[in-house]
Amino acid sequence: MSGRSGPGDIAAARAADQEAARRRREIQQALIRERFGHEVPGRPLVALNLVLTAAMVVTSALGVFDYDRFAFHAALVDLAIFAVGLTLFVVALWLGAQRSREAEMDVAAWFFLARVAPDAIRRPMLLALTLQTVVSLGAAFMTMAEATAAGDQATKMAFGTLVPIFGLAVNGVWSARYGAFPPRSSGVSAGGPGSR
């Protein structure tokens, strides 16, 4: 029957979709190379992210190995990083609102650096976010018994689960300031001088 697609048609459609996706990736990589060249802006944000992530990992490890002695200190470090993260999140939202007037922004690109950041930025930033998430959850689960034995209602290491807010916020600030977002397709920036 003419209304049915055969396996060859499905394979051809899949191949065409894969080729279109490959071309989109190549175009996006070309835009990133054109935008950044060999200069990659925002390295201080990457350094801040890596340093505070390392501090969180070290204090979390100490809290896991000796809950009674180090859990309180780890919780303080986690709360301090979370406070910095909240501040940066407000900055990221404000910068994103300004940038979205002339650029097409989406959440995956804004907070996870998908398609808008060179690998030299994206890889360490996502590695830091992954470490923050995995270490904080692991430390919280691993110290539940010690917390109960110490008389705590919940483990102090659970404060570490707030730290990934910092990682997301740093990503958001970086991409809102430097990300290679495509321009708005309308050609008129929202609230710009040409709008009525």
Image (spheres, rainbow, N blue to C red):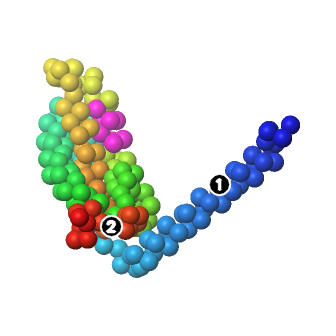
Who is closer to the viewer here, 182 or 44? 182
The amino acid on which the numbered mark 2 sits, given as a three-letter code, is Val
The circle drawn on residue 188 is 2
The amino acid on which the numbered mark 1 sits, given as a three-letter code, is Asp
Residue under numbered circle 1 = 17
Q: Is residue 167 above or below residue 141?
A: below
Q: For the point 14% across and 47% down, which residue is it?
A: 83
Question: Mark 2: few, some, or many residues within 10 Å (few <14, many ≥20)?
Answer: some
Q: Secondary structure at mark 2?
A: loop
Q: What is the magenta range?
A: 133-140
Question: Mark 1: few, some, or many residues within 10 Å (few <14, many ≥20)?
Answer: few
Tell how many labels. Answer: 2
Q: Is residue 129 left or right of residue 87?
A: right
Residue 79, percent from left and from top: 15, 42
Which corner quadrant holds the N terminus? Answer: top right
Return the disc, 2 or 1, that comes first in the chain's sequence: 1
Residue 56, percent from left and from top: 24, 47
State the residue lying farthest toward the front. Answer: 196
Q: CA distance from mark 2 to mark 1?
A: 31 Å
- Magenta part mainly helix, strand or loop? helix
Q: For the point 32% across and 67% down, which residue is it?
A: 188
Question: In which quarter of the view is residue 190 placed?
Answer: bottom left
